[in-house]
């Protein structure tokens, strides 16, 4: 049994209460020197995440990072590596918003630009069928 002073308590509670939260969230976050950062974050039920980012107006390359997350109340703390943390506020069953270190949400007209929307990933099985190739 975990005691309230146990540092793993939040992680364990986060994992067990994250079943409905888990999934892939997609959006384009603001970027100071490009058109935006296309972001895909997948929250797994075991408390791990994968985050893929692609800078628009760039050469089309992307970067995928892996880490863990803790879900406490409506704040999701994502840790990638030792020193990189990000915070997201759960807005609804299908929307999260990137928030600052003080866990404050953007309130300006740009607030919608900091939101990621839950999407169901495409599975190979959904692409089964017959396809016709037309050659000229």
Image (cartoon, rainbow, N blue to C red):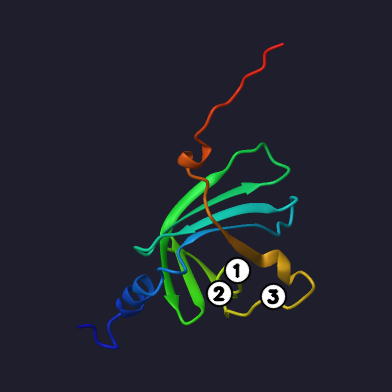
Q: Which residue is outermost to the right?
A: 109
Tell me the CA gap for discs 2 and 1: 6 Å
Residue 117 x/y as whole percent: 61, 62
Residue receiving disc 1: 95
Task: Give neighbour class at mark 1: few <14, some 14-19, many 20+ (Cα, 10 Å).
Answer: some
SS for dot 3: loop
Residue 114 x/y as whole percent: 67, 66
Residue in view at x 74 percent, y 52 percent: 33
Q: Earlier in the sequence, mark 2 or mark 3?
A: 2
Dot in front, 2 or 3:
2
Residue receiving disc 3: 106
**In this view, 98 is above or below 119:** below
Dot in front, 3 or 1:
1
Give yes or no for contact between labels 2 and 1 (Cβ–Cβ under 8 Å).
yes
Q: Which residue is outermost to the front?
A: 130
- Image quadrant containing the N terminus: bottom left
Q: Which residue is outermost to the bottom?
A: 4
Give yes or no for contact between labels 2 and 3 (Cβ–Cβ under 8 Å).
no
Residue in view at x 36 percent, y 78 percent: 10
Residue receiving disc 2: 90
Residue in view at x 58 percent, y 26 percent: 131
Tell me the CA gap for discs 3 and 1: 14 Å
Q: In which quadrant of the rendered view does residue 9 lie?
A: bottom left
121 or 12: nearer the eye? 121
Tell me the CA gap for discs 2 and 3: 13 Å
**In this view, 50 is above or below 85:** above
Residue in view at x 66 percent, y 53 percent: 37
């Amino acid at each position: 049994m975990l005691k309230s002073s146990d540092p793993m308590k939040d992680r364990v509670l986060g994992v067990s209460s994250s079943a409905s939260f888990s999934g892939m969230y997609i959006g384009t976050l603001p970027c100071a020197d490009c058109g935006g950062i296309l972001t895909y974050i997948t929250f797994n039920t075991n408390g791990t995440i994968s985050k893929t980012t692609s800078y628009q107006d760039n050469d089309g390359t992307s970067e995928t990072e892996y880490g863990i997350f803790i879900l406490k109340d409506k704040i999701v703390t994502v840790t990638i590596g030792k020193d990189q943390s990000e915070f997201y506020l759960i807005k609804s069953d299908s929307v999260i918003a990137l928030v600052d270190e003080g866990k404050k949400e953007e309130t300006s007209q740009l607030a919608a630009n900091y939101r990621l929307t839950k999407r169901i990933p495409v599975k190979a099985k959904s692409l089964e069928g017959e396809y016709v190739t037309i050659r000229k």
